[in-house]
Amino acid sequence: MAVTPLLSRLVDGLRCLPGVGPKSAQRMAYHLLERDRESARRLAAILALAADKIGHCKSCRTLSETDICPLCASGSRDRTQLCVVEMPADVEAIEQSGSYRGLYFVLMGHLSPLDGVGPEDIGLDQLKERCRAEEVREVILATNPTVEGEATAHYISEQVKDHGIRVTRIAHGVPLGGELEYVDGDTLSHAFSGRREW
Amino acid sequence: MIAPCAAWDTAMKTERVELHPAYILHHHPYRNSSRLLEVFSRDYGRFGMIARGVSSKRSRLQGRLQPFRPLLLSWHSRGELATMRTAEPDGAPPVLSGAALMSGFYLNELLLRLTGRHVPYPRLFRNYHRTLNRLGERRAGQDALRLFECHLLQELGYGMTLDHEVEHGRPIQPEAHYCYHIERGPVELATGEPANGVQLAGSSLLALASGQFPDQQSRKDALRLMRTVLAFYLGSKPLRSRELFRSLKGVNRGTTL
Ligand SMILES: [Zn+2]
């Protein structure tokens, strides 16, 4: 089958998705056009709508189509705890664990000292303002255990400490149910450096 | 003239390297689940390397391929960009947090900005390794940075003269005052003479030369001198890690970039 201009544009368009190379983009395009045109139309409509309507929550910066996201607006969250994460997906992960009832702040990235991604790019002024204006008593740093995540956590803790707020960092280490001998050395060394009184 | 042909040959020859000491200076996501690494290796210098599939959830390498971790990397290369095959830890990584972590980024930025690609710097590599460990031990981080800066310039061929003045070759006197001229060296400061260079005490020059800083004044002088000299080689583009460090108020606890 000859690839017409429109079809090749569709394949190109699909390649913007993560994990989608030329081959899988082509497979998706054929699937949508040959077997599932109705889904294709629905997908197109919802994509257009989402791209237009979804912005960022004015309070926590996560993706939201309302000014204040449902989580921030909820009356049943503990407003004295603020958990700082890198991405909206991290909020989802913590929410699914069901272990946290406080509020969030989503950086939408991390500091990257060598790329010039600075505090203003990850909304730290807004975070400080929240710490100042709201009833936050504890900031929980849940940035990733990468060097950039650590640098970001350090930076935030230095900024927030003087507001008289408790700053904690989530523990990283040995997975639950894992046997020590199968845990890789990098995780183990992290677990060791983060050990605590018992 | 066989040069062009020889160059072509080197560029196209596939090179395989096994378990070679290296650090990652910088990294970026690449395509779906790969990472583009800027590697600093002991015998092959700095170069770009692609690590395929390491950002997928199943990859154990994701945590390992971080800056500041001593690694043994295996790769093959054909032309400019190398492809990583394996990565093993090479001893325990230094525990860098807070100001020490920021200092680590600063070292990496200096290496990225000042070293040439594919130029081997085996001594500088070992010095970098030692400096990271000193930063991790949280003792005299600032002094470690100054010594690294000095050593870096020396390895780049911009070595500084710190033990004698350059007009008559006389040894530096601790109590005398000097003016350091970039790319030349210290000149003894005659009283009343206007000087365009970094002015500092002989004792501070000697402190930097020996790596032993007896007091805060010698540290301050060394910082001022190295900042000026480095700025000369770095050009007008500021160091991003230093800007970030400076914007962090209240962190100035024993370390200054
Ligand atoms: Zn929100």
Image (cartoon, coloured by chain):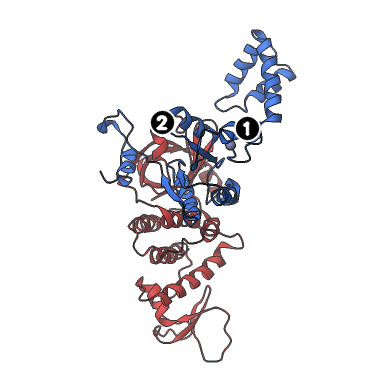
Q: Colour of chain B?
A: red
The amino acid on which the numbered mark 1 sits, given as a three-letter code, is Ser
Please give the name of the residue rendered at 32% of the width and 57% of the height, measured from the top-left corner.
Answer: B137
> Which type of secondary structure does the marked residue at label 2 adopt?
loop
Residue B147 in the image, given as x and y percentages of width and height: 40, 66
Would you identify the image quadrant in which residue A58 lies? top right
Distance from mark 1 CB to nearest ligand 1 atom below 8 Å: yes
Q: Is residue B126 positioned above or below B79 on the image?
A: below
Is B154 left, or right, of A186 in this rendering?
right
Q: Which chain appears blue? A: A
Q: What residue is pinned by disc 1?
A: A64
Would you identify the image quadrant in which residue A106 lies? top right
Q: Quadrant holding ligand 1?
A: top right
Q: What residue is pinned by disc 2?
A: B59
Q: Is residue B13 positioned above or below B250 on the image?
A: above
- Mark in front: 1 vs 2: 1
